[in-house]
Amino acid sequence: MFTTIKSASLAGIKALPVEVEVDVSRGLPNFVVVGLADNAIKESKERIRSAIKNCGFKFRPRRITINLAPADLKKEGTALDLPAALGIIADELPELKKSSILSNYLFCGELSLDGRIKKIRGALPIALAARESGCKGIFLPRENAAEAAAIAEIEIVAVSSLLETLDIIQEKIPLPERPETLTRSIENTTNFLDFADVRGQAQAKRALEIAAAGNHNLLFVGPPGSGKTMLAKRLPSILPELTFEESLETTIIHSVAGLIRPGQGLIRERPFRQPHHTISDVALIGGGTQPRPGEVTLAHNGILFLDEFPEFRRSALEVLRQPLESRDITIARAQAQAVFPADFVLITAMNPCPCGHYGDPMHECICSATQIQRYRQKISGPLLDRIDLHIEVPAVATKELINPESCKPEESSKDIRERVLKARKIQLKRLQNHTRRHNSALSDKDLKKYCRLDSDCRNLLQTAMDRLGLSARAYSRILKVARTIADLKNEKNIASADIAEAIQFRSLDRRLTI
């Protein structure tokens, strides 16, 4: 008996429709899977056989051929277990083929040996594929139902076992109610750290406010214990909440990477990724035989924080240059090619020298000028050019740590976030016809239109360019930062004070040569 069941397979961060064609016939007993299946799918034969037996069905000695169409598309993962098992059981239960559910729904799920259906990767993009292919709904594991429920146009049928799936198809039990997607608003979140807890560091906080308002990349330079990591971890508390489209994009990426928790719905908080400095190039940028998203993609619509910046491999850091400009990354392999989004805010932190105490009045630096130069040169000029804000973070004064009550109360994240949101609204209105609606994405044409300078601003910029030896890219970055500073003040035009502050945030351009 021949049966065709609809399913899907992941390709990058997308899911492509797959037809699972099952032919059960007489002949020498054999079980063959064809159609460019990976090892996980080839191993599914034993899972399917055991699941069918343990659900009370006979697995007769037949010649079973499973074709995964289209045959020229590489298939991966375990989501095709369920449709393959249903196709084999249809030989025992011919009435299954008459069911409208079997023909109109898409089926995905990994089978355990006892017939339970386990969580899969990529449930959300698979649900999108089901909608685009015209399916009425999708059967998928119960743990994945909340994330797939974000797609409102199709029915989401959450199942926990092969037997439950069969009962629904045969209409022995009704279709279960649609699960609700779980969302969480940033205003109701208590996990965020607050800027009010950070003593001092007014300039660093100001830089983070500018970075949040305009989506600018930032580099902290300071001695150990000055609060660089503490400051970076509080950046999510002043960023705007994800829009529905951003939330959907972010959830798809994390779903494909297998990072969605069972029962979790749409991600509503911006990602904060903090990989260790021993990370490999592939883990950072993405890749593999079948391309998978790396940290730069997992940080899409959020923050990528690289602590101990110079300790990362030079090759790993250099691969950041292209996605920092294009905001995506293309992974090309012999068998597959994928384009992953990578629109993130890069926050980095480093010590000023190998010992960490260069410029610290409380500790003596034991590094030579050559050692400091070599340490800083681990970060290439082209990569440094792509970082808009360079901030020196000095050690916090002892008085502020021991007697905080004698100091002025620190501003809370809530207050800072209100200013950031106002500046973002200005940018949204200004760039309403653009795909990316923040100042860091301004093109050269946009700079001429929205960053017009008077004679004082032009003279100040020219002086800075000549004295600091800034590149053309650094020039455009200064203009973008100045535009964001003006937006935070709700000013239509950029003033010379805005240009001066933006130039001030290029400290490594001033001190790279020692």
Image (cartoon, grey):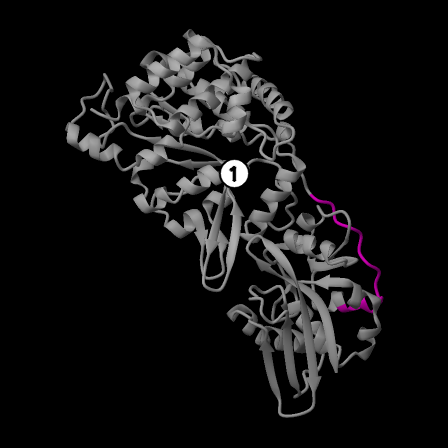
Asked whether residue 64 appears in the rendered view, the answer is: yes
Q: Write down the quadrant of residue 324 in the picture.
A: top left
Task: Give the residue at x 58% y 69%.
Answer: 72
Tell me if residue 180 is in the magenta stretch.
Answer: yes
Q: For this view, does 109 lie left or right of residue 39?
A: right
Q: Where is residue 246 in the image (x, y as percent from the top left)?
A: 62, 38
Q: Write down the quadrant of residue 229 in the picture.
A: top left
Of 374 and 398, the residue lying toward us: 374
Q: Write down the quadrant of residue 9 in the picture.
A: bottom right
Tell me if residue 10 is in the magenta stretch.
Answer: no
Of 159 and 306, the residue lying toward us: 306
- Label 1 is placed on what type of residue? Asp
State the residue position of label 1: 343
Q: Label 1 crowding class (10 Å Cα cut-off): few <14, some 14-19, many 20+?
A: many
Task: Give the residue at x 60% y 35%.
Answer: 435
Quadrant that contains the N terminus: bottom right
Q: Where is residue 378 in the image (x, y as percent from the top left)?
A: 27, 37
Dominant secondary structure (helix, strand or loop) of the stretch shown in magenta? loop
Quadrant that contains the C terminus: top left
Check disc 1 and report its element: helix, strand or loop: loop
Query: What residue span does the magenta drawing correspond to?
Result: 166-181
Q: For this view, does 120 lie left or right of residue 410?
A: right
Q: Position of residue 353 (x, y in %)?
A: 24, 29
